[in-house]
Amino acid sequence: MRYSTQVKPISYLKANAAEVLAQVAEAREPMLITQNGEARAVLMDVASYEETREQLALLRILALGDQEVEQGRVRPLADVVSRLRAKHADSGRS
């Protein structure tokens, strides 16, 4: 995706807000908004924003997992499975 094709000055956004929103929603590509020739904001549709937030959350979880592995905070899979099975068996008795 090239942001150079989706660059509009803030004056364009002010004059054509409904059109810009429709374009961003349809294309599902962010639009760079400039003010005095400098990049100031990025406008994106809600669905893309939510997807981006979910992807960032998953990346954070992966990074935390990597940190735990680096710190040696790991357990053998067999131990984890045994523990989960024991918990499941205990919950079935209640």
Image: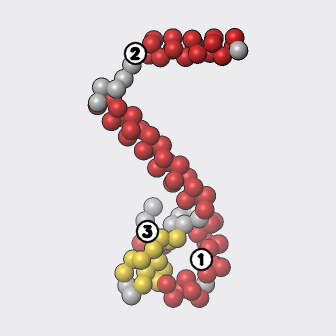
Spot occupied by residue 14 in the image (x, y as percentages of width and height): 57, 86
Residue that carries the numbered disc 3 in the rendered image: 3
| Residue 27 seen from this side | no
Work out which quarter of the rendered image holds the C terminus and state it.
Answer: top right
| Picture layout, residue 22 above or below residue 59 | below
Q: In this view, does 29 lie to the left or right of 62?
A: right
Q: In this view, does 89 lie to the left or right of 40?
A: right
Circle 3 Cα neighbour tier, 10 Å, few/some/many (<14 / 14–19 / ≥20):
few
Farthest residue to the front: give it: 94
Q: Look at 49% across and 84% down and name the residue there.
A: 10
- Mark 2 vs mark 1, CA separation in Å: 53 Å
| Picture layout, residue 90 above or below residue 1 | above
Q: In this view, does 71 lie to the left or right of 11?
A: left
- Mark 3 vs mark 1, CA separation in Å: 15 Å
Between marks 3 and 2 in the image, the one whose residue lies nearer the viewer: 2
Residue that carries the numbered disc 1 in the rendered image: 20
SS assignment at label 3:
helix
As shown in the figure, which amino acid type bears the numbered disc 2?
A: Pro
Residue that carries the numbered disc 2 in the rendered image: 76
| Disc with the residue nearer the chain's start (3 vs 2) | 3
As shown in the figure, which amino acid type bears the numbered disc 3?
A: Tyr
Spot occupied by residue 75 in the image (x, y as percentages of width and height): 39, 19
- Mark 3 vs mark 2, CA separation in Å: 46 Å
As shown in the figure, which amino acid type bears the numbered disc 1?
A: Val
| Disc with the residue nearer the chain's start (2 vs 1) | 1
| Residue 20 seen from this side | yes
Q: Look at 39% across and 87% down and name the residue there.
A: 36
| Picture layout, residue 74 above or below residue 85 | below
Q: Look at 42% across and 44% down and name the residue there.
A: 60
**Mark 2 in CB contact with mark 1 (< 8 angstroms):** no
